[in-house]
Image (cartoon, rainbow, N blue to C red):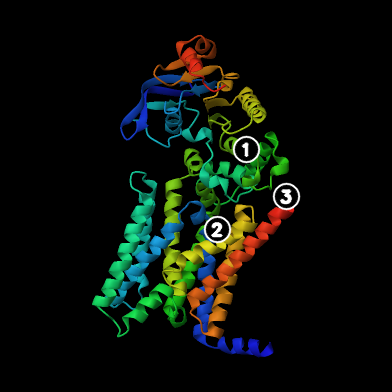
Amino acid sequence: MAEFFQMIASYFEFRFVQYAFIVGILIALCSSLLGVTLVLKRFSFIGDGLSHMAFGAMAVAAVVGLTNNMIISMPVTIGAAILLLRSSQNSRIKGDAAVAMLSVGALAMGYLLMNLFPTSSNVSADVCTTLFGSVSILTLSTVEVWLCIGLSIATVIIFVLFYNKIFAVTFDENFARATGVKATLYNLLIAIITAVIIVLAMNLVGSLLISALIIFPALSAMRVFKSFKSVTISSAIISVFAAASGLLLSIVRGTPVGPTIVAVDIVVFFAFLLVGFIISRARKA
Amino acid sequence: MPLLSFENISIGYDNHPIVENLSFDIEKGDYLTILGENGAGKSTLLKTMLGLIKPLSGKIVFDKKVKRTDIGYLPQQTVVQRDFPASVWEIVISGCLGKSGFRPFYTKEEKALAEANIKKLGLEELKNRCYRELSGGQQQRVLLARALCSSDKILVLDEPVTGLDPKVTIQLYDIIDSLNKEGITIIMISHDLHALKHANRVLHLGHEIFFGKKEDYLKSQSYQAFMDKGGEQ
């Protein structure tokens, strides 16, 4: 056991491992915060759609030759989030169809662009990295790390400040609107935060697995906890735990980071499912 | 001056009017029941009153002393709420948010108000319970407490007894009646004739529109027609 800890300690001497942990934990924290809202508002699919948009934007950034692709992917994803939110509220246009169209379109165009204008000799590996985030978390530059830290902290602060309003528009949008809460504004805020989180989380788990990072902790917490506050707090803890242990496992065992974190999330989900089942049985008995 | 004045209002969606040129007034302390069959425009009228949708023409004039956000609202339950993890306390106090602007947290006064409304509706023991685990009648009382946090002037209720058993239905009507006696103006949609018991005014939407005192409504054609169709007893 001591050897194991020594090995871990030796990994932590590397700067890139330290970065990966700081950024990974912050991203996991942020992504879990809005999970409850997105699941309950039936917006889970928007997260998925946005991540594909972000992939398309990243491809464009890579082709153009930008070193920091967040400059393009961030505004494009935020724009898409606002657009999707609008369309899903407008009952005349089918929201899910709009999401599907935008996301699949962006995915296809992104891959096409990367093939037409390859920036490296191994396009498949590049695509794989963007989709599953295998190494990007370990190759973050100092600028990217600080950008991640800054945006994560901003996200957490905004979430805390607007927590009560976010609860109100999630639980009952019509009531909130009727009594004077600026529901449209807060929906917009939710969409923008989601977009920011998705672009950040692409570094950690890649664009295909972001939904898992957003949804699993919330779903796990909802099996066991009963109030909005306890679900939010526990899903943040679950998410940070899964990210930290997933990162550790992937470094020790050499597995890809994103899928390892998601695997831990899945294990936690089933554990909570079981606990929730036992609690409800115990109550009935 | 009436509390709320509907002046030549036409309501509907996408320029398809459901009700046209409707005019009526609601006075302070009224208990108005809105009756009508499905599709007669009851919910649309309510949503227009709450400002959730715009009237196609005409306008709603509020007394100077009330704002649109002074209307407390008891909506119909949504699908989302059925598996929503929220405590009774969290839901009731969220009724205070409409007036808080951009202030992020609840004040002492708001907490006291939520506490008082929880007590008023007999929910003290359920305060920390999960909303989705409550019975239908308890859930309605929670939503009523939330509505009271948002306003103590006007209460708008959208079919509040849907899905409740007869005993709980009568309890809920009695609660609403006692709120009315405290001076809160009640506007309630129903397709249940029991809802008439405590009302002093009736608006009947349908082919023939009736608005007036309950006594007159009970003698009217609209009422007879509604009864003949077996308006749910």
Please tell me whether mark 1 or mark 3 is closer to you in this view: 3
Residue B145 in sight in this render: yes
Q: Nearer the viewer, residue A222 or A159?
A: A222
Residue B72 position in % (x across, y down): 54, 34
Residue B134 position in % (x across, y down): 65, 42
Q: Are marks 1 and 3 in contact (CB under 8 Å)?
A: no
Q: Nearer the viewer, residue A220 or B179?
A: A220
Helix, strand or loop under label 1? helix
Q: Nearer the viewer, residue B7 or B189?
A: B189
Gap in Å between the C-alphas at discs 1 and 3?
19 Å
Q: Is residue B14 above or below residue A217?
A: above
Residue A83 in sight in this render: no
Q: Residues within 10 Å of mark 1 (few under 14, many from 20)?
A: some
Asked if badges 1 and 3 are on one and the same chain, I answer no
Please tell me whether mark 3 or mark 2 is closer to you in this view: 3
Identify the residue shown where x is 73% and y is 50%: A284
Name the chain under label 2: A
**Residue denoted by label 2:** A160
Q: Which mark is residue A284?
A: 3
Please tell me whether mark 1 or mark 2 is closer to you in this view: 1
Residue B32 position in % (x across, y down): 52, 21
- Look at label 3 and name its amino acid: Lys
Gap in Å between the C-alphas at discs 1 and 2?
32 Å
In the rendered image, the residue lying farthest to the right is A285
**Residue denoted by label 1:** B136
Name the chain under label 3: A
Q: Residues within 10 Å of mark 3 (few under 14, many from 20)?
A: few
Q: Is residue A273 above or below residue B159?
A: below
- Look at label 1 and name its amino acid: Gly
Helix, strand or loop under label 2? helix
